[in-house]
Image (tube, rainbow, N blue to C red):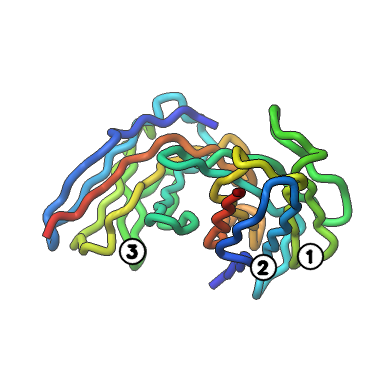
Amino acid sequence: GAVVSQHPSRVICKSGTSVKIECRSLDFQATTMFWYRQFPKQSLMLMATSNEGSKATYEQGVEKDKFLINHASLTLSTLTVTSAHPEDSSFYICSALPVINSPLHFGNGTRLTVT
Amino acid sequence: DAKTTQPPSMDCAEGRAANLPCNHSTISGNEYVYWYRQIHSQGPQYIIHGLKNNETNEMASLIITEDRKSSTLILPHATLRDTAVYYCIAPDNFGNEKLTFGTGTRLTIIP
């Protein structure tokens, strides 16, 4: 079945530094990937849509200059949290669509802790 | 997305069938109903989806009412590993490219 892999699964960084999270589709190509964020005891919130070869589309209230998304190939999208602050600590999850009209498949998430 | 309503929490005894309801009274004719679940500290896992007919796969069964305003996810023999938050979603784009997650139902399987 379709597999989406995220790396790293956990990361701790100091305030002010940047962190890159990778999302890979292992056995399929994905022109579109999605990035979600989940705070403790809350549901997933869509941050942005990552489009291969073009700019990402960000949801309202998500700072595009803070959350840099690059989708340089059909199997890889990256999310970079720039100048991280403690309030950016969260669970970041990516997803990809193997085929149009098929279910989305999700990675296992990245737990970011900013100290 | 069509608005969905789910009970915030449910308990089910291990080995029994878990029946999780979802109301989606504003669903339109071409909107599928998708079910995902999220086990603690993991990404969501796809379970099943359907449009009009009842569906069954190796994980669960989906019963959709004839008027499509509600559905029930059935886990036939719940195990402790089925403890998770279950999300019912009716995306408004036929391609299911953009999912909006509600608060879901926290299902606890009791030994």
Query: Of the residues shown, which amino acid type is indicated by label 2?
Result: Ser
Whole-number angstrom distance, CA of label 3 to CA of label 1: 30 Å
- Please give the residue where the numbered disc 1 appears in the rendered image: A74
- x, y percent for residue A71: 80, 57
- Would you say the residues marked 3 and 2 are in contact, meaning their CB atoms lie under 8 Å apart? no
Query: Of the residues shown, which amino acid type is indicated by label 1?
Result: Leu
Could you say whether the residue bearing mark 1 is in a helix, strand or loop? Answer: loop
Q: Is residue B11 above or below residue A62?
A: below
Left or right, A47 with respect to B39, comes to: right
- x, y percent for residue A17: 75, 51
Residue at horizontal 67 percent and vertical 68 percent from the top: A25
- Would you say the residues marked 2 and 1 are in contact, meaning their CB atoms lie under 8 Å apart? yes
Query: Of the residues shown, which amino acid type is indicated by label 3?
Result: Met
Q: Chain of mark 1?
A: A
Task: Say which quadrant the N terminus of chain B sits in.
Answer: top right
Q: Nearer the viewer, mark 3 or mark 1?
A: 1
Q: Is residue B79 above or below residue A114?
A: below
Viewer-proximal residue among A92 and B86: A92
Residue at horizontal 59 percent and vertical 53 percent from the top: A112
- Please give the residue where the numbered disc 2 appears in the rendered image: A25
Whole-number angstrom distance, CA of label 3 to CA of label 2: 23 Å
Are discs 2 and 1 located on one and the same chain? yes
- Please give the residue where the numbered disc 3 appears in the rendered image: B59
Q: Nearer the viewer, mark 3 or mark 2?
A: 2
Are discs 3 and 1 located on one and the same chain? no
Q: Earlier in the sequence, mark 2 or mark 1?
A: 2
- x, y percent for residue A73: 82, 65
Residue at horizontal 69 percent and vertical 54 percent from the top: A33
Viewer-proximal residue among A103 and B32: A103
Viewer-proximal residue among A109 and A100: A109
